[in-house]
Image (tube, helix red, strand yellow):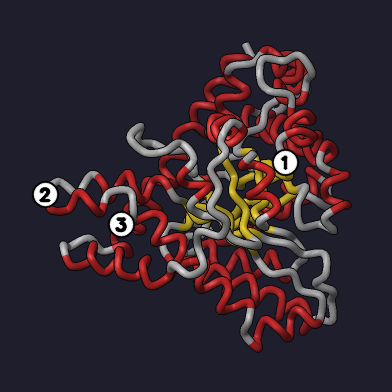
Amino acid sequence: MSLEKISNAGVSVWLDDLSRERMVKGGKASYLPQLIENDFVVGVTTNPAIFSSAIANSDLYKDDIASLHGRGLSAEEIITELTTSDVRQACNLFRSVFERTHGVDGRVSIEVDPRLARDTEGTIRQARELWKLVGASNVLIKVPATKEGLPAIRTLTAEGISVNVTIIFSVSRYQAVLDSFIAGLEDRLANGQSITDIHSVASFFISRVDTEIDSRLNDPSHQALKGRAALANARLAYEHFIEIESSERWRALAKSGGNIQRPLWASTGVKDPNYSSTMYVLDLVADKTVNTMPESTLSALRSSSDFSGDTITGRFAEARDTLSQLANIGIDIESVAEKLESEGIDKFIKPWMELIAVVERAKG
């Protein structure tokens, strides 16, 4: 069973979905406690699109929406109440995993309003609010890896808030994210505070990179490069991770109880039907990584017997060669990442606005 094997290889399997349906036995969606018990799921990630779909397509929220509306809450305040309530409930479901793994797993993520992606102070304010509202030690607050998000990562980490840094598309931005996290731990230590309970992940997006780059590989001579860019990009991010983990700077923090920020592979559902449905999982296996996946990918892994062990370390030269070949034909990963970051923010703002409209209508 591939799920068991990748878990044993050091990959934390997280589900990229959450809804009340999943937390009600006999609901329309797979029951989350069963996924935890049977499928090695040790965490959950959410985003505005996930919550928009969950609330729009379930009757389980109607009574709460009506009640909160009756108390005079705005649509956005109602959304905050609904989403933080769901995340709090999920955190309770993962409590035993959280305790068993000493805080490494059993994590549930909730994202700041995507409209704040270019607003450092707004991101910090809302992250603090969400941290308090959920009130669970195993929650992660999702903060965008925009240039404006980097100082927010440092500030929140220094304040003892565990973050999931999202929408990372390039190794250079990942390097800045990891540096911001480490600087936050150093700031906290300098203030005489403990860093032992702070955990973090850096969400490196996978499939969208291939979708964008593959669309540019129209020359017949370039076909061999299709489906290779995203894996190469992620593998080089992991190379930086292991370099930092072995650095003197990190060792000093580790001696003080610091927990390294783990790479998280996100957007791992395959978009191209010509590719194996499990490629963004089985080709990204390495110790101290997280893979958050839609249930369709989880199901494919459940029935898969394919497993090749560590598929990242030892392939760094190959990864650099792939990106070099792309650069030689005019495809620069940095410019691709800038485009995808901008599009990624928009892709989260749209469902967020749709969710506000859904709640407005449900208020009557």
Which residue matches tag 1? Answer: 40
- Is residue 105 shown left or right of residue 342? right
Residue 361: image x %, image y %? 57, 15
Q: Secondary structure at mark 1?
A: loop
Residue flagged by tag 3: what amino acid is it?
A: Val
For the point 40% across and 61% down, the residue is: 233
Residue flagged by tag 1: what amino acid is it?
A: Phe
Residue flagged by tag 2: what amino acid is it?
A: Asp
Q: Earlier in the sequence, mark 1 or mark 2?
A: 1
User: 10 Å neighbourhood of mark 2: few (<14), some, or many (≥20)?
Assistant: few
Residue 338, quarter of the rendered image: bottom left
- Is residue 259 shown left or right of residue 288? right
Q: Quadrant of the N terminus?
A: top right
What's the mark number on residue 219? 2
Query: Of residues 310 and 31, which is closer to you in this image?
Result: 310
For the point 76% across and 25% down, the residue is: 23
Which residue matches tag 3? Answer: 336
